[in-house]
Amino acid sequence: MRVYEEVGQKFPKDMLTILEGLPVDDEAALEARIEEFKAEHGYLVHDIVSISPETPNEALSKFDKAHTHSEDEVRLFLEGEGIFDLRDDDGVWFRFVLEKGDMIVVPAGRVHRFEPTFKKSLKCVRIFKDSSGWVPQYLD
Ligand SMILES: [Fe+2]
């Protein structure tokens, strides 16, 4: 995971949860770790989503504008890269670039946006309490 902060700014540690070095090359170990994480934090379901150069831009444009969700956004990267920008309570933005083995938990209600990197290639696990909570709520 790479973190980009403006000069003089440090992202608040309670802004999000970051886990790194998850065992993505060991399917059984990863599945066990995901189930353990779900049980610890009250998440109920998970699935896998992929983005490739063939993915239409319209499908991605839902998430590249500032939005929130009514539940946490949990993503664990199996392949590729993705960019999450999160805004703190003072309106300062921070950038987190996730790679294979990284997991992010964007808390419910935290303003954020997402886009793939220029490679437009990623595969990640999504973990939910209720997948209907994934609908983006835009700021305006
Ligand atoms: Fe989102």
Image: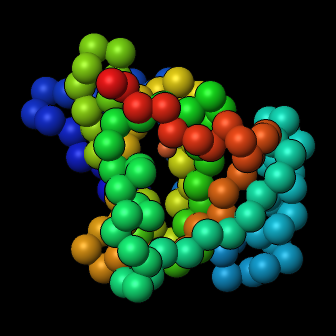
Q: Residue furthest left?
A: 7
Q: In screen coordinates, is 16 left or right of 78?
A: left
The correct choice, above or below, for 96 with respect to 138 in the image is below
The correct choice, above or below, for 89 with respect to 29 in the image is above
Q: Residue furthest bottom?
A: 54
Q: Is residue 97 visible?
A: no
The correct choice, above or below, for 84 with respect to 78 in the image is above
- Compare residues 90 and 58 and report the one nearer the observer: 58
Q: Residue at x 63, y 36 (%)?
A: 72
Query: Number of labelled discs?
Result: 0
Q: Could you tell me residue 107's position as x and y percent?
A: 57, 31
Q: In screen coordinates, is 87 left or right of 125?
A: left
Quarter placement of the N terminus: bottom left
Q: Could you tell me residue 118's position as x and y percent?
A: 25, 74
The correct choice, above or below, for 1 with respect to 43 in the image is below
Q: Residue at x 71, y 42 (%)?
A: 132
Report which quarter residue 49 is drawn in: bottom right
- Compare residues 93 and 60 and report the one nearer the observer: 60
Q: Residue at x 25, y 33 (%)?
A: 93
Q: Could you tell me residue 29's position as x and y percent?
A: 82, 72
Q: Residue at x 39, y 74 (%)?
A: 56
- Compare residues 99 and 53 and report the one nearer the observer: 53
Q: Could you tell me residue 103's position as x and y percent?
A: 57, 55
Q: How is the image coloured?
A: rainbow
Q: Is residue 120 visible?
A: yes
